[in-house]
Image: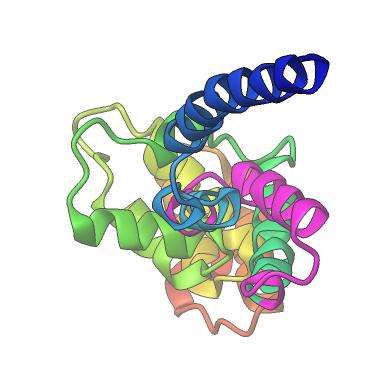
Amino acid sequence: QAQRRRLLKAGAWAAAAVPALSAGWLAAGPASAQPTGEAVLHRQLNEATWPAEIVRLADDYLQRFPAGPAASQARSLRERAQQAAQAIARSDVKLYRSAFEPPHPTPAALRELRSAALGDRDAAWRIARASPHGDSGDDHRYVGWLQFAAMLGSDGASYELALHYRKRGQPALAARYEARAIELGFTPPPALDHVRK
């Protein structure tokens, strides 16, 4: 009688446990059906266009997945974005995060922004030249991109800044950026000779 009661009790526990375990497995689902943290972070790292954000995401990836499939890429991206972030952090570079986040960017524009965020000086110069400037009077972003490109090592952007400041009647700044252009290997035409005297 006692043994029969023990068997009935064990059977009741098993009957209750099986549905509960099954429900837990169904809620969790197969592991392969859930997106992995590594894949999500890797995608974010490849889509970011702000240098400091790329550095942060690369650091996060390397901390969480030091032996992950994209660890080598994360280290390379971090190094390149760090250079760009340091250039933007300079007090003489007036370029802000909003410049890297246009409201309706095309795929081509996003590629250019991404390249610039990773320290591509030529991409930064191209973005500068495509920014509104001249007669509109609103050339702050244009100048900011030129300053950024110059700090990344673009001799052409440096010379273009020299021309810009000369037109604005700011000879000291014009001379400074002409000197920067020459330092980077640019040979200015005679038109700016008087600025250097």
In front: 138, or 60? 60
Q: Nearer the viewer, residue 192 or 94?
A: 94
Height in image: 185 above or below 25? below
**Residue 25: x and y, percent?**
50, 38
Quadrant holding the C terminus: bottom right
Outermost front residue: 1
21 sits to left or right of 101: right
Q: Nearer the viewer, residue 9 or 39?
A: 9
Q: Quadrant of residue 103?
A: top left
Please name the colour scheme applied to the rendered image: rainbow
1 to 52, vertically: above or below: above
Q: Identify the residue at image location x=79%, y=23%.
A: 3
Q: How many marks?
A: 0
Q: Is residue 91 left or right of residue 70?
A: right
Residue 136 visible to the viewer: yes
Specify the quadrant that holds the N terminus: top right
Residue name at image x 61 percent, y 28 percent: 14
Would you say residue 196 is visible in this rendering?
no
Residue 21 in the image: above or below residue 131 = above
Taking the magenta stretch, the answer to whether it contains residue 31 is: no
x, y (%) of residue 99? 41, 36
Residue at the (55%, 63%) spot, across then down: 158
Task: In the rendered view, tell whether residue 60 sits above or below residue 187.
Answer: above
Kindly identify the residue that appears in the image at 56 percent across and 81 percent down: 186
Q: Residue 106's x, y, as percent? A: 17, 51
From which residue to which does the magenta span run?
Answer: 45-72
Q: Position of residue 133 (x, y in %)?
A: 27, 40
Q: Is residue 192 left or right of residue 93?
A: left
Is 49 inside the magenta-drawn segment?
A: yes
Main SS of residues in magenta:
helix
